[in-house]
Image (cartoon, grey):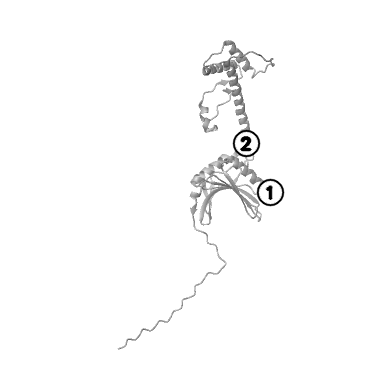
Amino acid sequence: MLLDAARMPEPSELPESIREFAYRNAAEVESGRDFDIHVDRLIKAVEQILGSKAAPEVQAATTHSAATLISPAPVAPPSTKRFPMPLVLGGAFLALAGLAAAIWFARDRLSVAEEDVDPTTGPAYCADYKQVIGEARTSFASIIGRSSGDAVWISTMQLPGWDNCIVADWTTEGQIIRYFGCELPSVATVDELCAKRDGVVAYLQSCLGKHWARKRTNFQNGATDTKFTLGSDEPVPHIRESIYTDGRGNILRIEVYVPSSLIRQGQRKQFPSSRPPHRRRPRRNRPTRPEPIAKT
């Protein structure tokens, strides 16, 4: 039942288990001049479901009791009269429908209030981040934009509230790992950085769900790396801190690494050594033995 211009939810707004609910026919009840007509139509629909018909005086009583939802009347003393079963069920149906409508409208107000939440810790980028995780299964092929350097590309998907979203290849220990990454503006103190990190980590845990395991690694300079794992061959989201002492400040980064099956083998970088190159000692020419002289 839809009260006062309430609308049926879209199939995409419902859980999969009750998605067919969006295709059901609904009875509309308006609080205007057609209120009595709509309530009579609702009573007839309930009678068809129950397989019985209410008496005319019962219908009038139902219409009067339903009208009190719009125009409150003085409270009457309790009555000992027993009402027929169709009337009881009809009243219960109206009460449940009103409660469902109230919950639905409260949901709309909540969604409007969420627009004012800080996008770095609010729901504004949850759906986008989940899409990035899905793109990791194809090495971010559909969101790679123009090149921005050696093995670095500008991402066509930019998370709201985050800056400099890129796709890049990182070579480490003979492996090439492709990842998506964005960053927040730098902050002056490590305490500010930790506060932002805790807010983002808590939000992502709620966004991804309880099935994602969380692990934090602490480094000697005070920075941390928090990663979420779902399985052995799934994308790996990261929340990583960079603490600089050269004036660049402290930066929080959000990243997604490709699954382990998409990590490629690459050449290990050769770093210069402080030792001089080893020189082989030249080989001496050994004297040859004279051939024996044959006796004649």
Residue 85: image quadrant is top right
Residue under pointer 2: 115
Badge 2: how crowded within 10 Å, few (<14), some, or many (20+)?
Answer: few
Q: Nearer the viewer, mark 2 or mark 1?
A: 1
- Residue 254: x percent and y percent? 59, 47
Q: Residue furthest left?
A: 296
Callout 2: SS: helix
Residue 194 position in % (x across, y down): 66, 48
Is residue 239 something that shows in the picture? Answer: no
Kind of residue at badge 2 = Glu
Quadrant for the N terminus in the image: top right
Residue 35, picture quadrant:
top right
> Is residue 266 shown left or right of residue 291?
right
Residue 92 visible in the picture:
yes
The local crowd at label 1, few if under 14, some if 14 to 19, many if 20 or more residues have their Cα within 10 Å, is: few
Q: Is residue 282 left or right of residue 115?
A: left
Judging from the image, what secondary structure is the residue with disc 1 in? Answer: helix
| Residue named by callout 1 | 191
Residue in the picture at 64% in, 34% down: 113
Kind of residue at badge 1: Asp
